Amino acid sequence: MKNWEKNVRKVVPYIPGEQPKAEKMIKLNTNENPYPPSPMAKAALKQMDLDCMRLYPDPTAHVLTDAIAEFYHLKEEQIFVGVGSDDVLAMIFLTFFNSHKPVLFPDITYSFYDVWAEMLRVPYETVPLNGEFQIRKEDYFRENGGVIFPNPNAPTGLELPLSEVEEIVKANQDVIVVVDEAYVDFGAASALPLIEKYDNLLVVQTFSKSRGMAGMRIGYAMGNPLLIKYLNDVKYSFNSYTMDQTTLVMGAASMKDRAYFEETVNKVVETREWTKGELRKLGFSFGDSKANFIFASHENCPAKELFEALRKENIFVRYFEKPRIDNYLRITIGTQQEMETFVAFLKDYLKK
Ligand SMILES: *Cc1c(COP(=O)(O)O)cnc(C)c1O
């Protein structure tokens, strides 16, 4: 071992879902939206004068924060934007999780939280979900260095009722509570109204799922202006120009197209409910997902075997080889046609 090696910040990186390059595939493994970005975003890109690339982008990301503020009827000072919500969440860990007490999050949840905690040397404790994979609010009523959980949770898709989210926020007013709402638009109640009431709450959302722009990388946090100021102070001390010109313009245009957003979200929700019915008939069991995926297991077909069989057909779903969830598949909701093909394959496969 070289001497310098002992001073390396060694990390076990987050493993993102696969981005396979198959010609004809049904990709249900990373919770992307099956529908493209708003036509208004595409038009905005076409109208851009690329000479603007000579200049640095606006470090305040004004056009984008303004569009987000308008959509949610907030003030711009209540919005922080970043390169996907992954960037926003990493900035939140760096800015707010600096106590010696452990940050709390569920044992089964977004697998990036422990990666950031490890990388940034933030102490943390995972809190087991109950037997039905639900968050129990009482488990968060104790001393800690901060709280973070997705709502709906990932990869379970289950919603924690807003009243219980509020109880967690209320019981933790000495620390920052982060509600990661990556999937909230698909049918759960947002904690956003609570930011006016609690100055310790950050609500984080993303363009990657409900707005069909995972490739553009836009996420945002909403909260009290003082929290947003602290986040911007850290961001400017790290990299002032995280949001590029194209992203700002397309993101703002997309936010303004509420009709398209609602139409595509509704289509995903309808297909999700249809898929639930079909999976139930085939002997799958799963909780009542409010996200754009279903976390399911089958009574007599092991998840890993099914995962491999689907893969051979170029149908990609997500399988986690982890305690408690290694007999489940996380199935992203694609277009209605994709889900019909998926279900047809299952019908045939499970007959054998
Ligand atoms: C997808 C996801 C994110 C990150 O999304 P970005 O593409 O970085 O915006 C954050 N949290 C959860 C729970 C997610 O599923």
Image (cartoon, helix red, strand yellow):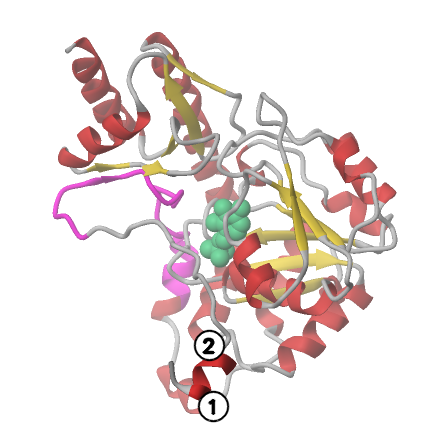
Which residue is under mark 2?
245
The residue stretch that appears in magenta: 21-44
- Name above or below for residue 23 compared with residue 77: above
What residue is shown at x 53% (from left), y 81% (from top)? Answer: 241
- Name above or below for residue 151 compared with residue 47: above
Residue 351 visible, this orientation: yes
Which x, y percent locates residue 342? Answer: 24, 26
The amino acid type, in three-letter code, at marker 1 is: Leu
Which x, y percent locates residue 336? Answer: 31, 28
Which x, y percent locates residue 98? Answer: 74, 66
- Residue 121: quarter of image: bottom right
Residue 43 is inside the magenta segment: yes
In which quadrant will I find the N terminus? Answer: bottom left
Label 2 lies in ligand 1 vicinity (Cβ under 8 Å): no
What residue is shown at x 75% (from left), y 54% (from top)? Answer: 146
- Residue 233: quarter of image: bottom right
Which mark is drawn over residue 55?
1
**Disc 2 + disc 1, Cβ < 8 Å:** yes
Q: CA distance from mark 2 to mark 1?
A: 9 Å
Along the line of sight, which residue is nearer the eye, 325 or 1? 1
Residue 257 visible, this orientation: no
What residue is shown at x 21% (from left), y 33% (from top)? Answer: 308
Along the line of sight, which residue is nearer the eye, 121 or 299? 121
